[in-house]
Image (cartoon, coloured by chain):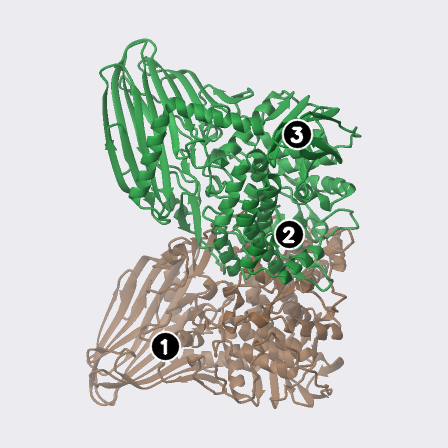
Chain colours: A green, B brown
Amino acid sequence: MSERRHNYETAPWELRWRGLALDQLHRTESTFALSNGHIGLRGSLDEGEPSGLPGSYLNGFHEKHALPYAEGGYGYPEAGETVVNVTDGKIIRVLVQDEPLDMRYGSADTHERVLDFRSGTLRRTTEWTSPTGRRIRLHTERLVSFTQRAVAAIRYEVEPLDDDVQLVVQSDLLANEPIVSETGDPRVAAALESPLVAEFSVAEDLRAVLVHHTRASGLKMAAAMDHEIEAPDGMRTQIAAEDDLARLTVAVDVPLGQRLRLTKYLGYGWSAQRSAPAVRAQVDAALAGAMQTGWDGLLNEQRTFLDRFWASADVEIEGDPELQQAVRFALFHILQAAARGESRAIPGKGLTGPGYDGHAFWDSEMFVLPALTYTMPEAARDALQWRHSTVDKARDRARQLGLRGAAFPWRSISGAECSAYWPAGTAAFHVNAAVADAVVRYVNATGDTDFERDVGTELLLETARLWESLGHHDAHGGFRIDGVTGPDEYSAISDNNVYTNLMARRNLRSAASACERYPEIAAGFDVSSEEIRRWREAADAIYIPYDDLLGVHPQSESFTSHADWDFANTPADHYPLMLNYPYFDLYRKQVIKQADLVLAMHICGDAFDVEQKRRNFAYYEARTVRDSSLSAGTQAVLAAEVGHPDLAYDYLAEAAFTDLHDLHDNVRNGLHMASLAGAWLATVAGFGGMRDHGGELTFAPRLPGELTGIIFRMSVRGSRFSVQIGHSEAVYRLLSGPPLKLSHYGTPLILDGDEVVAAIPEQKPLPRPAQPSGLEPTRRHAGQIPHD
Amino acid sequence: MSERRHNYETAPWELRWRGLALDQLHRTESTFALSNGHIGLRGSLDEGEPSGLPGSYLNGFHEKHALPYAEGGYGYPEAGETVVNVTDGKIIRVLVQDEPLDMRYGSADTHERVLDFRSGTLRRTTEWTSPTGRRIRLHTERLVSFTQRAVAAIRYEVEPLDDDVQLVVQSDLLANEPIVSETGDPRVAAALESPLVAEFSVAEDLRAVLVHHTRASGLKMAAAMDHEIEAPDGMRTQIAAEDDLARLTVAVDVPLGQRLRLTKYLGYGWSAQRSAPAVRAQVDAALAGAMQTGWDGLLNEQRTFLDRFWASADVEIEGDPELQQAVRFALFHILQAAARGESRAIPGKGLTGPGYDGHAFWDSEMFVLPALTYTMPEAARDALQWRHSTVDKARDRARQLGLRGAAFPWRSISGAECSAYWPAGTAAFHVNAAVADAVVRYVNATGDTDFERDVGTELLLETARLWESLGHHDAHGGFRIDGVTGPDEYSAISDNNVYTNLMARRNLRSAASACERYPEIAAGFDVSSEEIRRWREAADAIYIPYDDLLGVHPQSESFTSHADWDFANTPADHYPLMLNYPYFDLYRKQVIKQADLVLAMHICGDAFDVEQKRRNFAYYEARTVRDSSLSAGTQAVLAAEVGHPDLAYDYLAEAAFTDLHDLHDNVRNGLHMASLAGAWLATVAGFGGMRDHGGELTFAPRLPGELTGIIFRMSVRGSRFSVQIGHSEAVYRLLSGPPLKLSHYGTPLILDGDEVVAAIPEQKPLPRPAQPSGLEPTRRHAGQIPHD
């Protein structure tokens, strides 16, 4: 590609972009986004324009719109949901002696932005010469507080560089900011054009509040700002509020050598239930707290929070600085997506952009939560509590579909199914097993029995009921699950998807055990011992197809009898395939968008023997096109397991660079949280060989040739430990908490005070498996700065 | 049901409704519709109001609109097509001494309408007393000419019954008549609201013309009227034309004992290419011809045309007068749908209503054309020529889908795919085999080698190419066709649908033979002998799944392993199932909307042995819910074949009464052409046992116990003959044309001058197979007038 997409400087603890590159703003707004899981602010320039795609989000705050169907059907969701760009509080404009500071005019002599993974702030420094020759320096720093959930803050400093200058600074709250919608549906576009209806506005002193509600979903939100100003004498301020705009104006003459410093505190809140005065009160209170803490206090809290996070979660990659940066970038954004979501979902894009309409998917439980479970388990718990808060909607949906238990949505903000294409949505019932699996993983990793009793058991038993009603015992005694869609989106509506059936089996058994552990909870949901017996019977009988002729597991029944995809005649510009070939053709052929059977071999690896894994991996490598960003991380895990550490390294890099290199050409719409989590999985489950089959962690570390070492940290049941992987040995260290039992290549280890050094067995190099022609992952060479 | 839906009087050659029953107008407008396959006029009251659903149609004249997708996909059709209610020329209003004649006011002392199958006219007689007590008699007769394709005509007579009266008659051409759209899509509704844009209007003497075009599809249409008036002295006339209305007004005092008689001639035409003056000239010329022929002339031509049709096509049902009427009603409407369609399709509803948007489906080739092929072969040829005229669009569609050859649309007016739900549209590739089969059937039945060479061979070879590219040879040497949808719409996207594979096999072989018979045509399409060899190889290897355990053919691979539908817990008001259960659930279970494997046993009966047919029939009977009107006719054919003539009789009645009894509660949108044709098939292929496997007709007649005889007429290769079925013997009679070789229960017969009497072998009564609980077909007792 001729366009250079990544101009980030390599550094271990930050993401820095030097230079202006206004044509890349749509990308850097996503990568530089700040969020705490409740508030999300895209990394737009302070002055609002130029912009790629403005965006401020409140997790869960959405508008509804009708879903159109040329040919409808029973059970098709009627309403879509889409994330709303809320009142923008980031905007601070400055007039420099009557010239608006605008990066499109004048010249930016220096311009640099830094996302700092340890301070949790986005800093910007620019020296700008106005069209008429006035030079100023602008320095800004922005944070979305991890410790004060409803608060964001901006420190804004301007100083003249070559003469006294008059500055007029305007600090805004702007609702219904014009955005360009990418939807092809005029009704969705209409719903998103000016989605906010003004309810209330007030401005006084340096403080203002705007309250709005959405037209169709009827959600209320408030945004408030307050300011501290340090300026030379003679400053005049003025504040005003209209329906959709509140503005503080500060005018002051700044002599050379002095500066204007504005600190802007933002409070955000929303509610589906509470009144406008109540929502206003909430943001007023948040602001009061923030002002009380002050800018430096917020910065300190932010750093302390992050220090604690990195101490539990850091991954060190030795020998590949750019990859080191990318993996920390990934962890930082996963943290940002989840830290303070609390009773809300983790959307596929976090709060970094409007992609996927702001919906959450199964990716959350299957990719993001594993990383969180072992690094920040309370965030994993919160995300599962969000699922639990939607269980009534899921029960209703199951009923509508003629099923028992709960059917969680394929895509949603509120918990209601929003997928308008059922073969790739409703039929993908594996989302329910992902929820169950995340419950079991979280409980195993934390021993959180309160959660297990109050939340987990209900999720397990309702999903188990779903599986029992979804499958049936056939004439041959097998328990079949027909006509469903597995993880691979280039197949749909097939029988006995191996991943789905294995996950359903585990779901059924986990539910049976949980109900036996919590008989009073089970009784509350009318689970009888007969029902538990049926779950076990279904699990024991579940049908796992196998192709004896080829010696591989078909992804779903008959898959290996289907036609091969004609890769030789598929031009390179025809990927992603779904934009150039009909679903009809994709579904009926052996072409795979993303790991499916290979994911089964990761998550349910105990269901396959070593030779099956090798053969299956090679078979599916040759048929997987990775048109989904979910795939590379899983392929890395299995590549590492079956003996291809260098291929795993390439896939780790692909997962880790998905957004920094914009590999899917859509980072403008937000970051790929599951792919970022995939980088963690590729490291820990791939090179660490970490597995959690039944609660006890096992490791089988192996370093790829290009790296000199990997150290990752994680926690389980209150024990924090690190694993350091070298070429010939691994070192396990308990960092805090009680002693822990692990295993290394099948040998038990007890971690207590001392470090444990364990040899890594030799591995015979295996021939690298083939990918479809032209789709081989880029060979990663340590230390390289890749160019597209 | 409490509402009485059918109030037709039983008579052998007409459909008569006595009484007013304005709440039934939406139904009788469909059953009383007149059409010649080019023009269609719903059976509305002359005065336009009250009405159920006004409708005047020109075959092929349609509007386009965008198809909305909440989640789009590659290859999804962008444009929908929908039949347009064209300029209404049927309307004639009368003011009786200042009181508008309106059936909602005053009183209709007598009111009767008669659709006459031999005169080809709709007659109405009413004696009406106005709210102020004036009594008049109205007698009207309406025809759409079979002999003058662009012409309709109305004879309109009013006479005072108890005093001299002043009459004002208004005869209209009315464009953009307000109709109530049933679509849920606002864009379709918008496209159909005032779809006609005025281009030109003129009125002079007793004649007027309106020319319009459609907004998006840009088609031009003209409607013209001229009149003859017979009236007492002192008549005044006036004519005027606006954009959307032309009106002739006749005012006259009519003394008691005299009458006003107006004859209205209508000319209709449309074109996608020609200019407004050219389209106007066309309708002017049509009118001139009609005036030259005159009303009596048109009536005479109509009767002569119909006499010839009945002589070739009549079916006599002895012992069940209502069924006799229904079968003639069916034949009459099939004739009306197809007679003068010429280069246009036969829509699923004919030209009787706007149902299915006016689209044509595979039903045309698979159900309607068999009936036409043996009764009015030139209409079958014309319909196939319509398919042929769309072959470029079908080639483009195949290319778009990544396939070779031609992929005909699932639903269309113009030939472009309009199905917005691909699993039940695009994936139903069997439509292509239906086209090929209709070609072979027509050529076998007529020996029309010109057609075979110029039209048929191209259709066969392009569909064969489609099948070859759609299937593949698997590792076991079978030729598989995966991921397609068969006839049954409660299954989709399955592998190796038996019907599809058998039809594809025949298509491939027929194409190979045709290309060998017409090597110069084959060469023109670059068909090599190697390609022909591959077709034969694919046909020979095609995979036909069989369930050895159950001893039945699965409808598609794995079908018989799927869960059974829970009929016991399906409430009666939950049919049709697709309105109460998701496709997801229907597709994955053994529940069948319409004959699929059973249709295969009819059309490709030579691929099954007698015992397989019996077992398969019983198996699928128990799982077929007949939510489609396409099903009963086919079930009748197989019921008769495998030894259940009384069940076949019930199914014949169900097919024949679909519209007269409004069994699917949607006759307001038009008649079900395929179901009407199914009545013919049930009689001829069912009770006659007529099969055409490879060009030679075979018969195996058998009469159900309730009937005393059936006589049907048909033609093959220029020989017209009849088959009379009694309980113990059948009589074959050559009516015209050369001698003919047939077979009777496997015994060859030569039909020449004399009738041939052949004994019908005894048949042991078999136990009646079970249908799903509550879905047993209504037991038919001859002569009964069924009530819902």
**Are discs 1 and 3 located on one and the same chain?**
no
Element assignment for label 1: helix
Q: Which residue is mark 2?
A: A513
Residue B444, percent from left and from top:
67, 70
Q: Residues within 10 Å of mark 1 (few under 14, many from 20)?
A: few
Element assignment for label 3: helix
- Image quarter of the N terminus of chain B: bottom left
Chain letter for the residue marked with disc 2 in the picture: A
Q: Earlier in the sequence, mark 3 or mark 2?
A: 2
Residue type pointed to by label 1: Asp
Q: Which residue is mark 3?
A: A650
Left or right: where B471 falls relative to B149: right
Q: Is residue A774 visible?
A: no
Q: Which residue is mark 1?
A: B23
Residue B148, percent from left and from top:
44, 72
Task: Give the alpha-carbon distance from disc 1 to disc 3, as whole Å.
Answer: 72 Å
Residue type pointed to by label 3: Asp
